[in-house]
Amino acid sequence: MKNIFDIPWIGPLARTVWPWRLIRLTLLVILLVMAAYGWHHHAIPGVAVPDPLMYTNIANYFLWVLWIMGVVFLALLMGRIWCSVCPLGWLNGVVARFGRQREIPRPLRNFIPVTLTLVALQLAVYLLAIHRFPDYTAVLIALMLLGTITCGLLFRQRAFCSLLCPAGAVFGLYARVAPWQLRVKDADICAACSDKPCVSGDSHWKQLSLGPALLSLHCRRPDCPVDLVPAEISDSATCSLCLHCAHNCDKENILLGRRPWLADLRGAALSPSETFFFVVLLGMVTTNFAKVFVELREAIFWLPQQAALLLGWAAPGFYLLAGLWVTLAFPLLLLLPAYLVLRLGELRTTVTAGSDLPLAPPAPPAPPPGFWRQLGELSLPLIPLLLAAHVVLAVVKLNAKIGYLPYVLQDPTGVKSYLAMNVMTTVTPPGVLIPLDLLKWLVLALLVGGFFLALLAARRVTPAFTRQSRTFVAAATTAALTMTLLYGATVIRWLFIR
Ligand code: SF4
Ligand code: SF4
């Protein structure tokens, strides 16, 4: 499948807005249903377990198991495709039509706000365990809806997606690896296209007539929410796949379909603010991974634990320190050996004949790029490995919990299902989908695949065989090895030595 718009029946349908609107509306209704069933459900009276509804309530199960893990597979295969159907992004766009239409302030046009949102989410998970309780999850959904509407009322287009949605930023990273893209079919057609309706949003009247009856509709044509021009798209990270351009192009010149894997890893390094996001995500994924390896987990949390003891802080204080540690400091520590390799590669030796120290030192070479720029270059080839680790987490979670789905659909509050499984024991709790003896090899293969893809990506980023590129490949290999050893040790300890 090279272009979904060329598939008979599906293509013409996908080019129109209504099927997409229907999907987004359905997902919005599901989101509201989740919030309704999660609201006021915290625990079960008389049951001693503090979080009995974690996997049986629809709000928790759909958000933290099905969606948060399921979208990783979507991102792996189709980059930002979730953004095409996301009900929040769509709602933001709809509300923005009636809002103040302001531009996002320049200091916020980067990945800092979304990174801070991700850090805040991690803190909420540590401090309140929001992922364990349906009422907290329902509040989170309500806050997301509120954020969407507020952004829509204040700013032009989909400000929520770029300011407050960490999922969009994660998809943007993984879209560089995924074999999926939106491009134009023929650049010459675009060059000859003067009014460029694909991206020039405006409004127009549509008139439907049947005999003497005439119906006039005022239609708005939304423009590109991220100010891209389809013919100039060079990588898939920024395009949010909203499909406005595909709906607007009157020459049917937009292509949405397959391409080779890792296609965008030849492109520019991550910007400093996107590198900051990558670093936070790396910390979260790695800590999540190490959760099942007790000794490693204790080693990772040793420093915040000691700091909390020293300060005399109780559990909330420790969780605050732990949240900041795993999102900000620990991932930088993980990348430190690779960064040192990169800096050592800048070491130059100058030999001057004679026994006297030369009076004038040699002219210094051009200063290296700043810390975050260098880290941005280093992060690019690590994306496939981070994605592989993320996929492993998703596979393991879905494998263990997918069996709860029929019970969640039968009893969305989850109370009866929990009681039937754990109190009355009239129902056996669901088991795993793939036996662990098979799963462990699948997990190991994914990690090894991610490691070699990272090495391949490092070579793609610097295809030349200069000293600088050799240093870069050595640094990227160091980072990939550090990550793979941590993930591999966890998998071996957890699944192979049980
Ligand atoms: S994508 Fe379509 S509308 Fe946009 S410039 Fe190309 S031909 Fe014109
Ligand atoms: S280029 Fe712009 S309008 Fe087209 S799908 Fe991407 S974000 Fe949407």
Image (cartoon, helix red, strand yellow):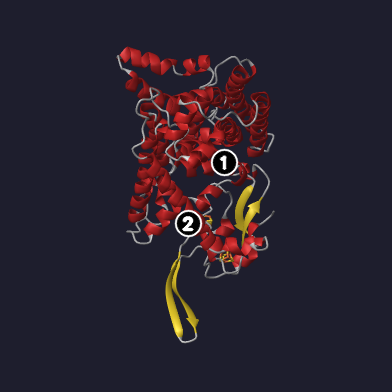
Q: Quadrant of residue 132?
A: top left
Residue that appears at 34% across and 56% down? 102
Q: Secondary structure at mark 2?
A: loop
Mark 1 or 2, which is nearer the eye? 1
- Residue 75 sits above or below residue 342 on the image: below
Q: Which of the numbered marks, if any, corresponds to residue 174?
A: 1
- Residue 346 sits above or below residue 295 on the image: below
Q: Amino acid at mark 1?
A: Tyr
- Asked if one can make out residue 282 in the rendered structure from this viewpoint, the answer is yes
Q: Secondary structure at mark 1?
A: helix
Mark 2 neighbour density, 10 Å: few (under 14) some (14–19) many (20 or more) = few
> How many circles with numbers are drawn on the protein?
2
How far across and down, in percent of the image, does residue 372 sit? Answer: 48, 34
- Which residue, as the protein is rendered here, is positioned at the far bottom? 212
Mark 1 neighbour density, 10 Å: few (under 14) some (14–19) many (20 or more) = many
Q: Is residue 313 left or right of residue 272?
A: left
Closer to the chain start, of discs 1 and 2, is: 1
- Spatial CA span between label 1 and label 2: 21 Å
- Residue indicated by mark 2: 227
Q: Is residue 452 left or right of residue 69?
A: right
The one nearer the camera, 344 or 273, is 273
The one nearer the camera, 400 or 279, is 400
**Quadrant location, ligand no. 1:** bottom right
Q: Is the distance from the Cβ of mark 2 to the nearest ligand 2 atom less than 8 Å?
A: yes
Q: Quadrant of residue 386?
A: top right
Q: Which of the numbered marks, if any, corresponds to residue 455?
A: none
